[in-house]
Image: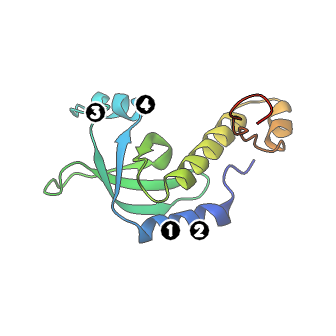
Amino acid sequence: MQIDDHQEAIALTEKLQANLPIKARPTKELVKSLRSQGKSVSPNQEFSVNFVSYSGDLGGIMCAIGDNPEDKEVHVVSITHLKIAPDYPLATEVQTYQQKRIRGLKLQNQPHFAAELLSQLPTVTQKKRSQGFGK
């Protein structure tokens, strides 16, 4: 089962490369992973993404993150493990990609036919709330 739409992912990667650096915070899964490696990381710690590349369905869009420009150590993580700053120009596109990728990964891990059926359903978008009755 294909996780990413390759053309969309490559197009987003190119847009991200043109808009570097990106300010991001780690998800709790990334915080756990980095702490297990002995790193001192906070969920509110801000990282700077200085490199972005697409690695196909295996890894998706990968980001090189660092919190200190003088530090020689850089971590390469999937963009799904980062919370992009809301004021970043491509934040909504990144969030949409993250949601689609996470959904695809969850469906891929389901061993029964429902995964294929669910993958064919269109993504549901939330309706804008109205101001009141009849308005």
What separation in Å lies between label 3 and label 4 (alpha carbons)? 13 Å
Question: Tag 4: residue type?
Answer: Glu
Q: Residue at x 42, y 43 (%)?
A: 82
Q: Nearer the viewer, mark 1 or mark 3?
A: 1
Callouts 2 and 3 close, C-beta under 8 Å: no
Judge whether residue 68 can be spotted in this image: yes
Q: CA distance from mark 1 to mark 3?
A: 32 Å
User: In the drawing, does residue 69 fall left or right of residue 50?
Assistant: left
Q: Residue at x 57, y 55 (%)?
A: 93
Q: CA distance from mark 2 to mark 3?
A: 33 Å
User: Residue tagged by mark 1?
Assistant: 15
Q: State yes or no: discs 2 and 1 in contact (Cβ < 8 Å).
A: yes
Q: Position of residue 131 (x, y in %)?
A: 68, 34
Residue indicated by mark 3:
37
Mark 2 is on which residue type? Answer: Ala
The type of residue carrying mark 1 is: Lys
Image x and y of residue 67, in percent = 23, 48
Mark 1 or mark 3: whose residue is earlier in sequence: 1
Q: Which residue is mark 2?
A: 11
What element does badge 2 sit on?
A: helix
Q: Name the image colouring.
A: rainbow
- Please name the residue that numbered disc 4 is placed on: 29
How many angstroms separate mark 2 from mark 1 (CA)? Answer: 6 Å
Residue 33 as seen in the image, left or right of residue 107: left
